[in-house]
Image (spheres, rainbow, N blue to C red):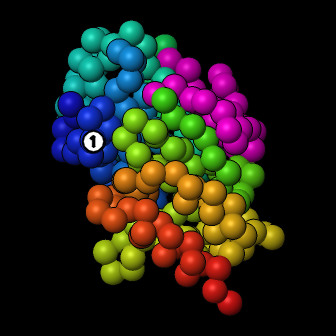
């Protein structure tokens, strides 16, 4: 599908790109659903040759689709979203609480409980500018900043320094707790590696840890 991308489940692809503004690798997601393509927090490689190869592959995928939608999980993940929405004439979706902070036109503000393209469903994250995305066809939970993966540190609620004033890790965990009622099979944080085994138990452990004093 895309250079260096991994298929985590049928129709669900993830790729990793170095983000110079952040100084780290970050992940993005591509979903194929009903002949359409949905890009979640997409980032095009910064270097010219990898960027050209990436765009050629994405152009080919878009040419075979009936349309392209671009979804961001929060304003910090603006990345290449406006550029790609413009390139493919697609709609840009963003959490209502992030719209003004994105500083670009947003076609569709979305909120908790809203159905998004690609069969995605938005869920509260504990902060008003970010929503997590549930993908029922694959059992995947896609998260921007509030849930992080890691090699040295396990899957976890983000540290307090990542949260707005007045928002706590325990508060985030309480907001995310209803997700435990879902048949979670994949955890796809956009910072850190995915969790493909025992995902529900891993999510439960992360929320339990965040609620501890």
Q: Residues within 10 Å of mark 1 (few under 14, many from 20)?
A: some
Res. 128 visible in picture: yes
Above or below residue 152? Residue 133 is above
In the picture, which quadrant includes the N terminus? top left
Task: Report x, y in % for residue 54.
Answer: 25, 33
Taking depth in this image into account, of 210 and 63 the one nearest to the observer is: 210
Query: Residue at (61%, 41%) from the top-left corner?
Result: 122
Task: Report x, y in % for residue 79.
Answer: 49, 43
What residue is pinned by disc 1?
Answer: 9
Query: Residue at (35%, 15%) from the top-left corner?
Result: 35
Above or below residue 17? Residue 104 is above
Q: Quadrant of residue 198?
A: bottom left
Query: Residue at (37%, 53%) from the top-left corner?
Result: 185
Segment colored magenta: 90-118
Q: Is residue 111 left or right of residue 203?
A: right
In the rendered image, the residue lying farthest to the right is 166
Res. 52 visible in picture: no
Task: Report x, y in % for residue 33.
Answer: 38, 23
Q: Is residue 12 left or right of residue 166?
A: left
Count of marks placed on residues: 1
Above or below residue 52? Residue 157 is below
| 117 in the magenta segment | yes
Q: Is residue 165 left or right of residue 70?
A: right
Taking depth in this image into account, of 94 and 48 the one nearest to the observer is: 94
In the picture, which quadrant includes the C terminus? bottom right
**Element type at marker 1?**
strand
Task: Report x, y in % for residue 34.
Answer: 39, 17
In the rendered image, the residue lying farthest to the bottom is 213
């Amino acid at each position: 599908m895309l250079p260096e991308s991994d298929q985590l489940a049928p129709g669900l692809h993830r790729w990793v790109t170095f983000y110079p503004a952040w100084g780290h690798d970050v992940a993005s997601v591509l979903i194929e659903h009903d002949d359409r393509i949905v890009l979640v927090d997409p980032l095009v490689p910064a270097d010219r040759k990898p960027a050209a190869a990436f765009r050629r592959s994405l152009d080919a995928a878009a040419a075979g689709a009936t349309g392209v939608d671009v979804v961001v999980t929060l304003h910090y993940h603006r990345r290449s979203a406006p550029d790609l929405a413009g390139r493919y004439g697609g709609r840009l979706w963003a959490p209502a609480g992030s719209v003004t902070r994105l500083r670009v036109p947003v076609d569709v503000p979305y909120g908790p409980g809203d159905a998004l393209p690609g069969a995605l469903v938005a869920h509260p994250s504990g902060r008003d500018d970010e929503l997590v995305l549930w993908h029922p066809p694959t059992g995947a939970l896609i998260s921007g900043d509030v849930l992080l993966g890691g090699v040295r540190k396990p899957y976890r609620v983000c540290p307090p320094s990542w949260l707005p004033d007045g928002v706590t890790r325990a508060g985030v965990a309480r907001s995310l707790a209803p997700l435990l009622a879902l048949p979670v099979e994949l955890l796809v944080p956009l910072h850190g590696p995915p969790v493909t085994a025992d995902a529900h138990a891993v999510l439960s452990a992360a929320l339990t840890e965040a609620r501890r004093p």
